[in-house]
Image (tube, rainbow, N blue to C red):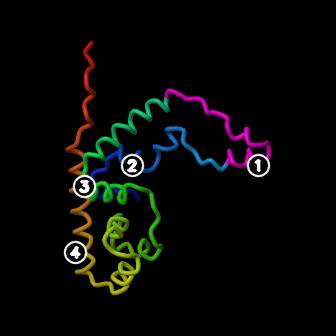
Amino acid sequence: MGVALFRRIDDLTWYFNSAESALGLSSNYSAILAMGFRGPSAGADYEPIYDGMIDAATRFRKVRARLARCSPRAHRILRAAYSHTLAHPQLVAQGALGDLVQVALLDATERELLRLVARGVAAELADLRARCRSALQAAEREFMETTSPARAEVSL
C-alpha cells in the first residue's frame, strides 16, 4: 500500500526498505551454513563491489545525512510510515487508519488501537487519523527542507 495518501518520497522508501540489499549487505546465514559444512575459512569469502553498490553508498549517505538533520521524532515517524512493516491483521482489515497504522503505533500500543477500532467511534478514529496525517506531513516537510551537508572543499 505504501504512503500513497501523502507525498511519496522515493529516497525514504528506498532507504528504509531496499538500501541494505543495494549496498550488498545480506544476511550472514549463508556464511554460517558454509562454515558449518566446509570449516571456518569458508565464511570469509569476500563479495565483489559493483558500480551499483558505489552509487547506493552515495545515495545512502545523502539520505542518512538528511535524516540526521531531522528531529528524532520526525525520523521515527518517517521510519514508521515508509518501512514496509506489517501491522496487526485486525488493524489493517478494519482500514480505519489506512496507511497510518505504524505512525499511530508510535504513540499507542497495539492493544489500545485494537480497542479503539473495535469501539468504532468514528470521531475518535477521524481525530487519530488527522493527528497521524499531520505528524507525517510535518515530518516529510522537515525532511524535504533539509539538504545534504555540502562537501568541504579542500584547498592545497
Does 4 sit left or right of 145 as displayed? Answer: right
- Magenta range is 30-51
Q: Mark 1 to mark 4: distance in Å?
A: 54 Å
Q: Which residue is nearer to you in this view: 90 or 152?
A: 152
Q: Identify the residue position indicated by label 2 in the image.
A: 13
> Residue lying farthest top?
156
Q: Identify the residue position indicated by label 1 in the image.
A: 36
Mark nearest the camera among 1 and 4 is 1
Q: Identify the residue position indicated by label 3 in the image.
A: 139
Judging from the image, what secondary structure is the residue with disc 4 in?
Answer: helix
Q: Mark 4 to mark 3: distance in Å?
A: 18 Å
**In this picture, is 133 found above or below 114?**
above
Where residue 34 appears, x then y in whole percent?
74, 44
Q: Mark 1 to mark 2: distance in Å?
A: 36 Å
Judging from the image, what secondary structure is the residue with disc 3 in?
Answer: helix
Q: Identify the residue position indicated by label 4 in the image.
A: 127
Where residue 18 appears, x then y in whole percent?
47, 46
Q: What kind of residue is marked 2?
A: Thr
Mark nearest the camera among 1 and 2 is 1
At x 37%, y 55%, the residue is: 82
Q: What kind of residue is marked 3?
A: Ala
- The numbered mark, 1 or 3, whose residue comes first in the sequence reads 1
Q: What kind of residue is marked 1?
A: Gly
